[in-house]
Amino acid sequence: MDDRSYMEQALALAKEAAQEGEVPVGCVIVRQGQIVGRGRNRRETDKTALGHAELEAISDACKNLGGWRLWDCTLYVTLEPCPMCAGAIINARIPRVVYGAADQKAGSCGSVCDLFSMAYNHHPQVVCGVCEAEAAALLSDFFQRLRLTLKTRPKWRPKQSLQEESDEMESANCRIGSACPDCGAAAMQLDPGKQT
């Protein structure tokens, strides 16, 4: 298989993520022609900032190969890695990274910054733009649908404003114990014999 074929596997995982309401990013890790790690975004599902496709795939590959050094693997991901994932790639010693769409907001392989060119002890080779149109279209469609959903969803409204909450707390402080230091009002003393 070639880079495009492996990226198509990552795109399939990205589509699974989108079906579950996750940002559609998928990742596979390949060693000697075999996929040894798979991952997709699960931040919303797992309620964790660490739920990125690359981290899941790296973890899966490490478990499958029995070690943390992935020095003879290639990572394929549909979106340019963020700083957290680029750091994980460096730490896992992955020598080659292939991504689809660039990420102008968080991409750390050249778009916003290039962590792989910094003075770390490991410098992966990067290939960008493999299946770029497909990866970008998945992301664009997902966010377009999300914006439509957010427009029709009722807006969240707090029970009360922060000022109302602050006033309520101040009022409660005035009723308990001694005179209120803020407003000077005499406070009501609690009778220890009465249940409140």
Image: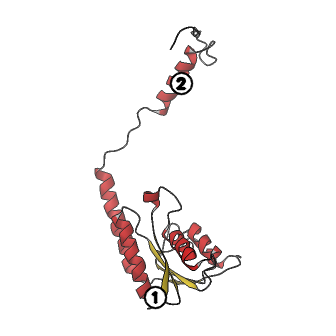
Distance, label 1 to label 2, CA atoms, is 61 Å
Please tell me the numbered disc located at residue 57.
Answer: none
**Label 1 Cα crowd, 10 Å radius (few <14 / some 14-19 / many 20+):** some
Tag 2: amino acid: Met
Q: Residue at x 62, y 83 (%)?
A: 71
Q: Residue at x 36, y 70 (%)?
A: 16
**Does the image show residue 159?**
yes
Judge by depth and name the residue closer to the eye, 19 or 195.
195
Q: Is residue 57 above or below residue 4?
A: above
Q: Residue at x 60, y 77 (%)?
A: 66
**Label 2 Cα crowd, 10 Å radius (few <14 / some 14-19 / many 20+):** few
Disc 2 element:
helix
The residue where tag 2 is placed is 169
Compared across the picture, whether 51 is left or right of 141 comes to right
Asked which quadrant contains residue 9, the reply is bottom left
Color encoding of the figure: secondary structure
Residue 7: percent from left, percent from top: 43, 82
**Does the image show residue 77?**
no
Residue 131: percent from left, percent from top: 40, 82
Q: Is residue 103 above or below residue 126?
A: above
Q: Is residue 88 above or below residue 188?
A: below
Q: Residue at x 52, y 72 (%)?
A: 54
The residue where tag 1 is placed is 3
Query: Given contact means CB atoms under 8 Å apart, are the residues at marks 1 and 2 in contact?
Result: no
Tag 1: amino acid: Asp
Question: Which quarter of the rendered picture does the N terminus lie within?
Answer: bottom left
Disc 1 element:
helix
Residue 132: percent from left, percent from top: 41, 80
Judge by depth and name the residue closer to the eye, 6 or 23.
6
Q: Is residue 147 above or below residue 184?
A: below
